[in-house]
Structures are given as C-alpha cells and as structure tokens.
Image (cartoon, grey):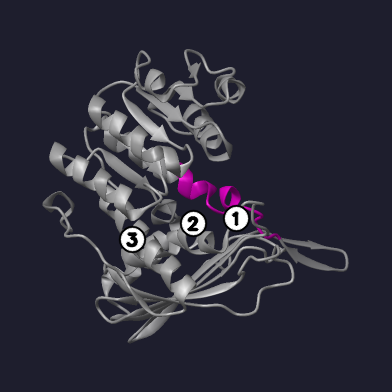
Amino acid sequence: MSGVLGVAVLGAGHMGADHVRRLDRVVSGARVAAVADPDVERARAAVAGIEGAVAHTDPGAALDAPGVGAVLIASPGEAHEEALAAAFARGLPVLCEKPLVPDAEGALRVVEAEARLGRRLTQTGFMRRHDGEYLRLKALLDGGRLGRPLMLHCVHRNVSSPADFTSAMLVNSSVSHEIDAARWLLGDELTAVTVLRPRPSGKAPEGLLDPQFVLFETAGGALVDVEVFVNCGFGYEVRCEAVCEAGSARIGGAHTMVVTEAGGAREEVPQDYLVRFADAYDREVRAWVDAVRRGRVTGASAWDGYAAAAVAEAGVRALETGARTPVDLAPRPALYAPE
C-alpha cells in the first residue's frame, strides 16, 4: 500500500479520542478519514479541525467512508466482535484495542474467522509490547544472559476505579495486560490461575474486592504473580521484575521526573495509563501504520487476544471459587504458529 493510510476510528471516548489525536498529530503516513461513535456530538468533536474526516454514528458507514484503508477499534469491548467481522468482510487491516472480545468464546470466533481468511488482518492493542522498558526486558530475557526465567513479580496499581468497576474486572480488565505481557516476555502459555484476596482496602468502594493477588503458572514451570490494586489513591504504577537463574531485572521504577525545590524533592507519579504509556501507544500505532502500508500485520495477534481472554476467564472463576483453576485453550490454528 502506498501513500497516506486513511484510518476509520471506531469509538470516540477517552481512548478513541486519544488515538484520533495521535493519528492526526503524531503518526506520519496516516490520516483520520472517519470516526464513528453512537454519540454523534462526541464523534463530531473528535474530528473537529481534521480536514476530510467525517463523523458517523454507524460503524459500517465509517468503514465505507471514502479513503478508508484500515480501522482502529477503540469502542467498548462488547462491540468489538461485530466491528471485527465488518472489517474482515471488507478486507481491512485492524488495530483492535484490548480486549479483542471480552469473552473467550467470542474471541475464539474471531480467531476462527480470521483463520478462514488465511491471512492476518488483526493486531490486538497490547501496548506494553511497544513500551521501551518492556522491550529492553524482552531483549534481555531472549538473549539468555540471565539464564532461564523462573518468576515474574508484577505490580499494577490505579489511583481509583470507575464507578461501575467490579471485582471480576480487576482480573479481566486490569490484569489482562499482565497476562499478555507475561506470555510475551516468557514465550510461554499460562496454564493455571489462583487468586488470593487480602482484606479490601478502606479506599475501595463497598463490595469491591480490591486489592487482589493473582498467581499464574506457565507451561514451562515459571510462576507469575500480580498485585493488582485499583484504588491505591496515589498514582498509576506498573512494575515488573524477572527473576532468572543467573540474575534479575526490574522495570517500571524510574521513568518519572524528580523535582527538587526548597525544602525537599518530589517524584512525579503518573495518574493514568495514557500518561505512563504515552510513548508506547505512539510506538504501537506508528508500527501498525508502517506495517499496514507495507502490506503486513504484525504485533500481538488475534490469537494473543483470545489467549488473554481465556486466561482472564479462568482467573475470574478462580476469584469466585477460591480454587486453583486450569486454563483451557483451544488448538492454535496454523496461521498463528510461533515465529
């Protein structure tokens, strides 16, 4: 594909509007051709000042808008399966924000539909794979200098949770990022989940089991633990430490500015993911645009989106039952064979 890539963005909420801005102002080789959102005023606000971009309430109309050559899905997860099917029917490459589809059954349908096409059209939006610190950790682990990874220790904290956030969402929304990051860093599938529940924080809304401690087992025998705390009250923190046979490596602790003033010093703490992972989102969308313009689709696949959904579902069952819960993955289609 030559020339500028016209992108239809589905969803003009917090994430979608940020991607519209990114495509318009940050990423070269692409332009926003159309935006769709059920709230027409929100769609119009997203395209305001962008020459040639049109606002729609119907996703299909946005996909069929003149000049559209790819689609970025940033709508709520419940709308993703239908949007992906519409993109597949038109042969449009897709960058789909996580979750690919919220439930494993629906995500598997997407995998099977793409496999029938015989080619990848989907990149799932797990942006940590594009974060500079995560990329360095991945390169270090793949290089083998520290020996085999034995454990990953992960921390995922948010200032506060939305009003509609549930205990299950700590696993299937927040920890889904750690699920994908662990699979990618270790090059291994997660095979079982256990969820421990300490006493809830007094800052958590009534009835919300927050924080949680999630333990994953891998096919290769490594362990991954995640402290997820979505009402910590002070900032957005993501950290990961890999413990290997010959050493360890830790990321996520030194990426903010330290301000020194009279009387002391203060370290700035990001307040949300769009601040902490701003560069990762830029890299992710830039890589997607560059690949699509070369006629390719790279990055996290639909299979990765399905695997994350399947592991998260096992995690929710573990949360509800208190028992160690195996992960049941379907056979991997040849299209998604590891490279």
Q: Residue at x 45, y 66 (%)?
A: 316
Q: Nearer the viewer, mark 1 or mark 2?
A: 1
Look at label 2 and name its amino acid: Ser
Name the kind of residue labelled 1 in the image.
Answer: Phe
Read off the magenta span: 268-282
The circle on residue 165 is: 1
Report the side of 63 relative to 297 (left or right): right
Q: Is residue 212 left or right of residue 177?
A: right
Secondary structure state at the residue bearing disc 2: helix
Image position, residue 133 (x, y; %): 46, 61
User: Horizontally, is 309 left or right of 187 in the view?
Assistant: right
Taking the image as drawn, is residue 250 in sight? no
**Above or below: residue 151 compared with residue 208:** below
Q: Which of the 4 quarters of the picture holds residue 95?
A: top left
Assess disc 3: are there few (<14), some (14-19) or many (≥20) residues with their C-alpha within 10 Å of its C-alpha.
many
Q: Quadrant of the N terminus?
A: top left
Q: Nearer the viewer, residue 211 or 45?
A: 211
Q: Is residue 281 magenta?
A: yes
Q: From mark 3 to mark 2, how far is it between C-alphas?
A: 12 Å
Q: Is residue 140 magenta?
A: no
* Mark 1: few/some/many CA within 10 Å (<14, 14-19, 20+): some
Q: Which residue is mark 3?
A: 310
Residues under numbered marks 3 and 1 in contact, where contact means CB atoms less than 8 Å apart: no
Provide the residue designation for mark 2: 173
Rendering coords of residue 332 (x, y %): 17, 57
Where is residue 67? Give x, y as percent. 35, 16
